[in-house]
Image (cartoon, rainbow, N blue to C red):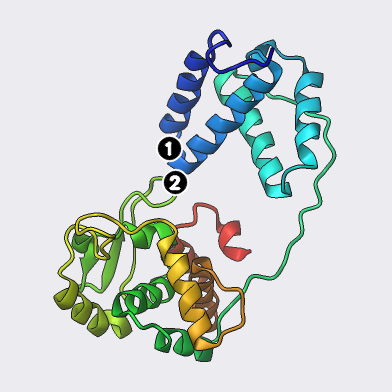
C-alpha cells in the first residue's frame, strides 16, 4: 500500500522544522515551497522519514527520477535533500550519483536597435513603462511586479527594492529616459499601492502576466530572439559594462550577493 503524507509519522513536524530553518536562513518563498515538495515526495515514495532511510534508498529514488526530469529539476531534488540533511539533521549526505552534464548556452542580449523596436511595439503604455524600467534599472521581474508607488523617488532618481531576492533591500537607478512615460501612465491609471496595477487596483500583477505581455510585444516588433523578462535585465548589465560601469557598482544595482554571479 502506497504511503501518504498522513500515514508517515512525524512528517508534519519535519516539514515545520524544514520551513522554519529556511525562514530563519532568509531563503526565498519559492525555494521554501520547492524544497518542501522535494522532501515530501521523497518521504511518500519511500514511506518513511529521511533519517530512517538508507543511502541506497535515496540514491535509487533520485536515479529513478533522473530520466523523467530535466537536469535542472533533478538538481533541485538533490539540493533540497542535501539541504535537509545539512541544515535540519546536522550532517552531510554523500550521494554516489552521476555528474549531470549541464549545457551552457549564451544568454540572449537585445541590441539598442531591438530595444527600440520592442518599446515601439507596445500598444499599452503600462507595458512599455514596465519593459523600459526592466531594461533601464536591471530589476528582476518579481521586483518590478511588487514595486510600490512609495518606492519611486524621482528626486534622487532611485528605485527602492524592498525584500528582493535573498530578502535584502537595495536601491537601483530610476532611468530619466522613462520618467516622462511613467508620469503619463500614473496620471492615466491612478494606481494604488503597487505602481503597476494587477487586475484590481491595490493588487500586484500576476507572475506570468509580464512574460505574456513581452511575448506579444516581441511578435509585434518582429524580433525573432527568444527573449524573456530576464533578457531585459541581462541586456542592462551587458550595456552597462560596455558603457564603462565598474563591476562592483553593477553587482550592487543587480542585487547579487556573489560577485561571481555578476561576472557570469
What's the residue at 82%, 34% (across, down)? 97
Which quadrant, please, contains the N terminus?
A: top right
Q: CA distance from mark 1 to mark 2?
A: 6 Å
Q: Quadrant of residue 196?
A: bottom left
The residue that mark 1 highlights is 26
Mark seen at residue 166 = 2
Outermost residue on the top side: it is 9
Q: Is residue 187 above or below residue 206?
A: below
What's the residue at 81%, 26% (across, down)? 60
Mark closer to the chain start, 1 or 2:
1
Seen from the viewer's position, the closer of residues 210 and 147 is 210
Q: Position of residue 114 (x, y in %)?
A: 52, 87
Q: Is residue 141 above or below residue 110?
A: above
Mark 1: which secondary structure? loop
Mark seen at residue 77 = none
Q: Position of residue 195 (x, y in %)?
A: 24, 65
Q: Position of residue 89 (x, y in %)?
A: 59, 17
60 relative to 152 in the view: left or right = right
Amino acid at each position: 500500500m502506497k504511503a501518504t503524507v498522513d500515514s508517515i509519522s512525524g512528517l508534519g513536524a519535519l516539514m515545520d522544522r524544514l520551513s522554519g530553518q529556511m525562514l530563519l536562513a532568509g531563503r526565498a518563498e519559492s525555494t521554501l515551497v520547492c524544497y518542501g515538495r522535494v522532501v515530501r515526495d521523497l518521504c511518500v515514495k519511500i514511506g518513511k522519514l529521511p533519517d530512517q532511510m538508507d543511502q541506497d534508498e535515496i540514491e535509487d529514488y533520485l536515479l529513478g527520477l533522473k530520466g523523467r526530469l530535466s537536469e535542472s529539476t533533478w538538481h533541485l531534488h538533490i539540493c533540497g535533500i542535501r539541504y535537509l540533511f545539512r541544515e535540519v539533521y546536522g550532517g552531510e549526505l554523500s550521494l554516489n550519483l552521476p555528474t549531470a552534464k549541464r549545457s551552457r548556452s549564451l544568454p540572449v542580449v537585445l541590441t539598442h536597435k531591438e530595444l527600440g523596436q520592442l518599446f515601439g511595439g507596445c500598444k499599452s503604455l503600462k507595458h512599455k513603462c514596465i519593459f523600459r524600467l526592466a531594461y533601464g534599472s536591471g530589476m528582476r521581474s518579481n521586483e518590478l511586479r511588487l514595486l510600490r508607488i512609495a518606492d519611486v523617488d524621482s528626486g534622487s532618481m532611485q528605485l527602492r527594492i524592498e525584500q528582493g531576492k535573498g530578502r535584502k533591500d537595495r536601491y537601483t537607478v530610476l532611468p530619466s529616459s522613462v520618467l516622462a512615460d511613467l508620469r503619463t501612465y500614473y496620471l492615466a491609471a491612478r494606481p494604488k499601492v503597487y505602481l503597476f496595477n494587477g487586475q484590481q487596483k491595490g493588487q500586484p500583477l500576476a507572475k506570468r502576466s509580464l512574460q505574456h505581455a513581452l511575448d506579444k510585444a516581441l511578435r509585434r516588433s518582429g524580433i525573432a530572439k527568444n527573449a524573456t523578462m530576464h533578457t531585459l535585465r541581462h541586456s542592462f548589465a551587458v550595456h552597462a559594462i560596455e558603457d564603462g560601469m565598474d563591476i562592483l557598482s553593477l553587482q550592487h544595482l543587480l542585487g547579487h550577493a556573489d560577485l561571481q554571479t555578476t561576472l557570469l
